[in-house]
Image (cartoon, helix red, strand yellow):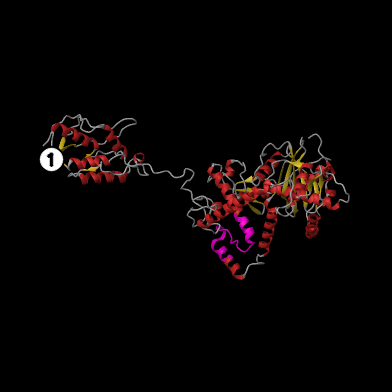
Amino acid sequence: MAHGRTAGSSSDGTADSDDSADHEKTDSSRSSTRLTRASLRLSQSSQGKHGGSTNNLCQTLRWCSTPWVSPSAGQYPATCGQSVGSSWITKTLMPFTDMKQLAERDESPPRTPTGNAPSSESDIDISSPNASHDEGMAKDQKDSGSDPSHRPKRRRFHESYNFNMKCPTPGCNSLGHLTGKHERHFSISGCPLYHNLSADECKVKAIEREKQDDERSQGQSEESRHATRHQAPTARQVKYKEKVQEMRKRRDAGLTKEQKEKYMEHRQAHGMTREPLLENITSEYDLELFRKAQARASEDLEKLRMQGQITEGSNMIKTILFGRYELDTWYHSPYPEEYARLGRLYVCEFCLKYMKSQTILRRHMAKCVWKHPPGDEVYRKGAISVFEVDGKKNKIYCQNLCLLAKLFLDHKTLYYDVEPFLFYVMTEADNTGCHLVGYFSKEKNSFLNYNVSCILTMPQYMRQGYGKMLIDFSYLLSKVEEKVGSPERPLSDLGLISYRSYWKEVLLRYMHNFQGKEISIKEISQETAVNPVDIVSTLQSLQMLKYWKGKHLVLKRQDLIDEWKAKETKRGTNNKTIDPNSLKWTPPKGT
């Protein structure tokens, strides 16, 4: 039995808006038969009016032939059955009690990760002759994907990860991290596969490192409670030192034949795409220290990447071709963008001009007349020479030198304002010319008596004694000027290590040659040109400065002096030192 109704139905728009929000819009019109909570409430009201029995209940349904209309912000969808020619039909359904249970069960359904609400009993497709046709149309519209904005948004992953990025190591799926603290990596520094490890092994090692750090911090906190200003090594530190020495003694003298064959096979199979096998090359203790340093450096790089200071594909020069060497860079240098984006730079080792390709470099070298740095040669002994270059007279050369140095220095900020500085460039001569070994710069007029503003040894000459030669030469100039000098802070990591080693060597040599009973820090400073603050800090690190009965005493530790003397004897006559008699230099006046 059909009941005639007007076009304007008193249905609840809230329920319809829930359904329309859960389903995406489509461009083509579709017809569907839906049973909603609104129709249930409508049927309840009609039941009260007509007094019909629950067993022979006729529910009033809407047949909607108009397309879905999506609501705008803060609006409800247009109700079906308005003046568009819609008709009302009736269908006999399940008892009213069952329908009521379905309505109660259809509360706010949980949403899926994609943003769509799952199908529930409140959205029941009523079988009709056109049901299969309607489903087919909906499926075609879904597959076509006419408008990406209509599709449900996917769940966003960690915002810092770009999943288009991949680890450059061949065969790596970018999962895991060398630190054991991240689920993915995008660089070789964090790749477990490159370091011949698995992601699970990295996590286990990370847990072990955390335990060791906790134990060490607890031990240090207990010792600091009773610590004095200058104390001898504690029993715990002495025991740990003995343990380390024993572990280093147990290391095998060399590799066996099987191990060498294994290493060669690994090298031939992977080449430069994997780290060489490091087992049995050194002691387990030193290898573990190296692994900790790798993990720490990788964690620092990951933090910089998270902060946006390092991005994949950023303009950073990876390698430079310098003379007969190909050098991997360490830090970013502000070369012009057209050169920095190339990733590889070609630099003339004499005039320091930078170029884009090997062809341009070859043509430049054929006509470059420079064979040594510009300026005056103020020191020469054997093949070693030092040139004094004025930043005001040779501005382009000094700017290129600063840009080159920034590739290997972290704290350098001087690039283009080179006029107030003098540059002392150390070279090594052969039959092709004077090759750049390193340099240091100093202010022409320093109010704080800094004798070094920036110092660098080229990577191919590191660990050969040239760094100490540069430092010794800077103090030799301070002696000629009759001043006390000190390097400008902050020092780089390698610079700090070199200076501490130099100050230690100077003090031990002075103690070895000293024959008196009373020693003065001021006298040491005047004779060595080292700042008294640097002398005191070095004496404290060597535990040679003690406070006793209201006075500071300098202890002459013979064991350290003997150790230094043995190293000097072992080095022999090949030791690289600066000869003051080979210096031909007078302090500049009023520059």
Residue drawn where x is 55% and y is 58% of the image: 274
Seen as rendered, the residue at the extreme right is 516
Q: Is residue 175 or residue 573 the one in the foreground?
A: 175
Relative image position of residue 36 (x, y in whole percent): 24, 38
Q: Is residue 171 left or right of residue 108?
A: right
Relative image position of residue 324 (x, y in whole percent): 66, 54
Q: Is residue 192 left or right of residue 2?
A: right
Quadrant (top left, top right, bottom left, bottom right) of the C terminus? top right
Relative image position of residue 515 (x, y in whole percent): 88, 51
Q: Give amino acid for label 1.
A: Asn
Q: How many marks?
A: 1
Residue drawn where x is 61% and y is 52% of the image: 215
Does the magenta portion include 282? yes
Seen as rendered, the residue at the extreme bottom is 257
Q: Is residue 128 or residue 342 the one in the foreground?
A: 128
Query: What secondary structure is marked by label 1?
Result: loop
Relative image position of residue 354 (x, y in whole percent): 64, 45
Q: Is residue 451 left or right of residue 58?
A: right
Relative to residue 45, is residue 558 depicted above or below? below
